[in-house]
């Protein structure tokens, strides 16, 4: 049995465990610590949690995979390499005088060493690192390129045997923020990459998020939500100064590329621009520029490679509205977005790369991703203890009774907490850690967001029976590989918009999740039970959390939501609870 541990320790740290080439567990650190976007250090809590889910011990681990960009600095020999980097730091400070302090951290020094061909791995205190994690001395420890981990996760889990691969985010090591390549015959080839300071689409969107008073790397979705309320053409040219496709059509540029202070100058420009105009119009223009530049880049890649399928990964593809015009490209047959597209998914990509080294090629079988229920599940005893400790009355229901009770509650206009099976990996709640409601109530956007302490303009998403999706949403066939993971928006057919107003955004789009009976049978049966009562084959699905908290992980997190009146009733496994006594 080969056991591989993958670690990501960026702004959203995570750990995953592969057993004999199969992903047995993956969990973001934030779900365990209950601190939103908990990262930038080794994810010990996520590691322990993932091992427990996978049912393996630390001594069983044969290899651990990480990224260069988050090198564990305290396990790094400082002798001769330290002197080399110190000299480079002095030179860098001279060149970057006046640049933001973020340019001068330890990770940046390591990136500079890599850029100049200096091999840092021999200076890694491997045995000390393995001992600190409680791993056996003979275990392998490997470091991989940030964007290579994005690329392999997208290509491998797409299930495509031949496709173009695109990765775009804020920035990885060596200042790379974009790579393009191909996947064929089980081999990933990088064709090109972008590293121009002041041209990263991800960093541009982060700067806009911050200028609007939101938290970058967390609230980009709020900018997207606002964009539908504004007029994109008013400020399109102004935002185009900060991001556009380069004449080569193979990378991006801005008016600030080539300046020593490119990052800071573009950030200052965007802040002035956002603050001088209504934020809805600013968001709309920024989103339009973003979509046009990235879609044109993808279109050029497809034309040059002759590929008809595209697999993408990286933080910018959390922007579900961007993914809609990508899927609609006439030359594209199928699009796949890796569901954990932020850096939290890099643990999976790193482990895949190490598995490629350790596993015999003939034993590795690629298959299309069907679900991401890779987290923890809890037995009935644990659920009962959580309810008892909160002093809440509950009853155990047989499955048919549970489904009937839940469907009746949704149909009656109540908000249901649905805590079932194994937790999802990635940013979306996909029917195992979800809050559910009927989609027919137009005012629920205001009332439910208020209960959850969320921004009122953020839309809710529908979970729809897979067999009914094409009748309700435009372009469902070309988006089919994205829809199970809620990674794309679709236009809602006009005849359905008035029937399901709670899940239709002001621009007529929705972010649907298709639910297949053979992937999540219990959730499918719940939606089917609601359809039998209402004639509508979908429910409103929002993540089971309040604003600024991670999605619930433990039964007590779900019980707390009931106690705080965030929800009206709770299905905690087979246990049913309400705030009132039975």
Image (spheres, rainbow, N blue to C red):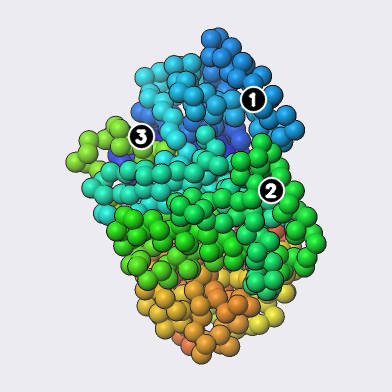
Q: Quadrant of the N terminus?
A: top left
* 502, 112: nearer the viewer: 112
Counting residues from the start of the chain, the first of labels 1 and 2 encountered is 1
Q: For the point 72% across and 36% down, which residue is it?
A: 100
Q: Quadrant of residue 281?
A: bottom right
| SS for callout 3 | helix
Q: Residue at x 29, y 58 (%)?
A: 306
Of labels 3 and 2, the one closer to you: 2
In the image: residue 542, left or right of residue 1: right
Q: Is residue 295 above or below residue 366?
A: below
Total marks in image: 3
- Expressed as whole percent of the image width and height from the top left, the position of residue 288 reads 59, 66
In the rendered structure, are the residues bearing label 1 and label 2 in contact, judged by CB atoms less than 8 Å apart? Answer: no
Separation of marks 3 and 2 at Cα, in angstroms: 38 Å
Q: Residues within 10 Å of mark 1 (few under 14, many from 20)?
A: some
* Nearer to us: label 3 or label 1: 1
Q: Which residue is mark 2?
A: 266
Q: CA distance from mark 1 to mark 2?
A: 20 Å
The vertical placement of 511 against 161, above or below, is below
- Mark nearer the N terminus (3 vs 1): 1
Mark 3 crowd level (few <14, some 14–19, many ≥20, 10 Å Cα): many
**Relative side of 346 to 288, left or right:** left
* Residue receiving disc 3: 354
Residue that appears at 56% across and 56% down: 244
**Farthest left residue?**
362
Of marks 3 and 2, which one's residue comes earlier in the chain?
2
Q: Of all residues shown, which one is farthest toward the right?
A: 276
Q: Which residue is mark 1?
A: 92
Query: For mark 2, does the 10 Å Cα neighbourhood hold few (<14), some (14 to 19), or many (20 or more) residues?
Result: many
Indicate the secondary structure of the residue bearing disc 2.
Answer: helix
Residue at x 49%, y 74% (from the top left corner)? 490
Image quarter (top left, top right, bottom left or bottom right) of the C terminus? bottom right
């Amino acid at each position: 049995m080969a056991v591989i541990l993958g670690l990501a320790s960026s702004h959203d740290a995570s750990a995953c465990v592969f057993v004999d080439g199969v992903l047995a567990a993956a969990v973001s650190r934030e779900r365990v610590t209950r601190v939103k976007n908990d990262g930038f250090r080794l994810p010990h809590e996520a590691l322990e949690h993932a091992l427990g889910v996978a049912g393996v011990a630390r001594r069983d681990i044969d290899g651990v995979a990480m990224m260069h960009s988050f090198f564990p600095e305290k396990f790094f020999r400082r002798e001769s390499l330290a002197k080399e980097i110190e000299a480079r730091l002095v030179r860098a400070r001279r060149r970057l005088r006046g640049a933001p302090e973020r340019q001068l951290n330890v990770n940046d020094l390591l990136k500079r060493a890599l850029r100049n061909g200096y091999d840092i791995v021999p200076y890694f205190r491997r045995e000390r690192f393995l001992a600190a994690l409680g791993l056996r001395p003979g275990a392998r420890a490997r470091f991989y390129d940030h964007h290579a981990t994005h690329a392999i996760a997208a290509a491998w889990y797409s299930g495509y045997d031949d496709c173009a691969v695109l990765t775009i985010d804020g920035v990885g090591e060596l200042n790379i923020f974009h790579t393009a390549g191909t996947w064929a015959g089980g081999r990933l080839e990088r064709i090109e990459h972008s590293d121009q300071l002041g041209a990263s689409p991800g960093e541009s969107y982060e700067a806009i998020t911050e200028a609007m008073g939101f938290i970058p790397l967390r609230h980009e979705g709020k900018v997207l939500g606002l964009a539908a309320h504004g007029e994109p053409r008013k400020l399109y040219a102004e935002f185009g100064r900060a991001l556009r496709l380069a004449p080569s059509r193979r990378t991006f540029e801005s008016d600030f590329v080539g300046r020593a202070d490119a990052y800071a100058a573009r950030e200052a420009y965007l802040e002035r621009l956002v603050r001088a105009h209504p934020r809805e119009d600013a968001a709309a223009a920024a989103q339009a520029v973003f979509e046009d530049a990235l879609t044109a880049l993808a279109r050029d890649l497809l034309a040059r490679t002759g590929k008809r399928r595209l697999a993408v990964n990286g933080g910018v593809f959390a922007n579900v509205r961007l993914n809609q015009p990508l899927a609609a490209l006439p030359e594209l047959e199928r699009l796949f977005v890796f569901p954990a597209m932020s850096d939290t998914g890099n643990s999976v990509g790193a482990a895949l790369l190490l598995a490629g080294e350790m596993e015999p090629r003939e034993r590795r079988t690629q298959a299309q991703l069907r679900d991401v229920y890779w987290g923890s599940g809890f037995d009935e005893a644990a659920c009962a203890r959580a309810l008892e400790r909160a002093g809440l009355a509950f009853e155990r229901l047989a499955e048919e009774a549970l489904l009937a009770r839940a469907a009746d509650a949704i149909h009656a206009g109540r908000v249901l907490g649905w805590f079932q099976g194994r937790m999802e990996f990635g940013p979306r709640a996909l029917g195992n850690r979800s809050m559910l409601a009927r989609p027919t109530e137009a005012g629920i956007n205001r009332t439910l967001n208020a209960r959850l302490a969320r921004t009122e303009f953020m839309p809710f998403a529908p979970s729809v029976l897979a067999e009914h999706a094409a009748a309700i949403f435009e372009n469902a066939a070309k988006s089919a590989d994205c829809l199970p993971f809620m990674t794309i928006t679709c236009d809602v057919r006009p005849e359905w918009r008035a029937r399901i107003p709670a899940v239709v955004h002001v621009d007529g789009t929705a972010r649907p999740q298709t639910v297949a009976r053979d992937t999540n049978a219990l959730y499918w049966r719940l939606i089917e039970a609601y359809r039998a009562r209402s004639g509508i084959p979908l429910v409103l699905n929002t993540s089971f959390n309040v604003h600024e908290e991670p999605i619930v992980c433990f039964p007590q997190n779900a019980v707390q939501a009931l106690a705080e009146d965030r929800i009206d009733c709770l299905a905690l496994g087979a246990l049913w609870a309400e705030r009132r006594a039975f």
